[in-house]
Image (cartoon, rainbow, N blue to C red):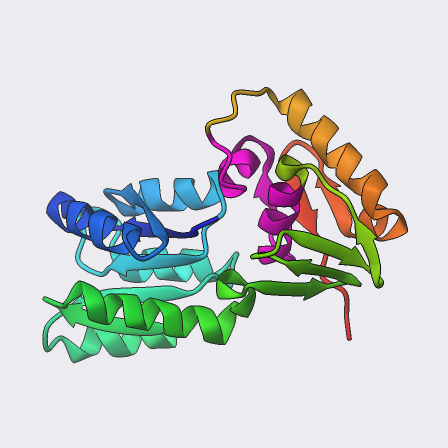
Amino acid sequence: MSTRVLLIDDDTRMYELLEQYLGQNGLSVTHAADGGRGLAALEASAFDAVLLDVMMPGMDGLEVCKRIRAKSRIPVIMLTAKGDETDRVVGLELGADDYLPKPFSPRELLARLRAVLRRSQPSAVADRLESGGVSIDVAGREVRVEERAVELTGLEFDLLVALVRRAGRVVPRDALLGEAGRSDTVVGERTVDVHISHLRQKLGDVGTRLIKTVRGVGYVFAKEGP
């Protein structure tokens, strides 16, 4: 499952460049051409990071950053005009995790993305996940619950990884298959519910306790305190 990045920028050519380069490095990019569409995309689906341009028509990037931070701690990298120190300072004060002045190299952007993901969301790039007594070997596709091996179907495994990678964040039902890297599977919402039900049963008490239904929205893998 690739890391999902939302690019909020009115520059279509930049999107095409980043889609190709980041895609070759295991990241998928979704494009929103303005702030309103970007905020709507964040409500409709789950992403691992946001690339946010400051200078956009209508709602500018600083206002978008402010609204994102009112609801989420998702990593945000601001894309600013070269030499515009004011935008960089204000962006960081509003809660942006990093900034990158234009023009920039895709290679540097990739390095910045990986750095903010490691700092703020280590599970987004990890090959082994641990949460609430559930241990997942992503590469080996093995799951253990409190040291007990659990046999899952391929789709159940992918759904679990998608939820645990975003523990504490709601994943909308209609986007969950895409988050699991299974957007090729044509199913309805009821089918997703059935798979989640089976997953809960196989994980036992841990699954029932941690995989929560958010009525009318989707599912969340609840974070437990230390």
Against 80, residue 89 (above or below) is below
State whether residue 24 appears in this view. yes
Horizontal relation, residue 19 to residue 193: left or right = left
Residue stretch in magenta: 157-183
Q: How many marks?
A: 0
38 with respect to 105 (left or right): right
State which quadrant residue 111 falls in: bottom left
Answer above or below: position of 48 versus 185: below
- The x and y percentages for residue 83 are 10, 78
Instruction: Please report the residue visible at 51 percent of the width from the left and 42 percent of the height from the top.
Output: 179
Q: Is residue 121 left or right of residue 95?
A: right
The residue drawn where x is 28% and y is 43% is: 31
Q: Residue at the spot x=28%, y=66% of the render?
A: 110
Q: Out of 13 and 110, give the one closest to the viewer.
A: 110
Residue 94 appears anywhere in the view: no
Q: Residue at x 61, y 50 (%)?
A: 161
Picture layout, residue 6 above or below residue 152: below
Percent coordinates x, y for residue 191 in the rendering: 66, 23
Q: Per the image, is 179 magenta? A: yes
Figure quadrant of residue 140: bottom right
Q: 53 or 164: which is nearer to us? A: 164
Residue 223, x across and y down, in percent: 71, 61
Looking at the image, residue 122 sits to the left or right of residue 144; the answer is left
2 up-or-down from 215: above or below: below
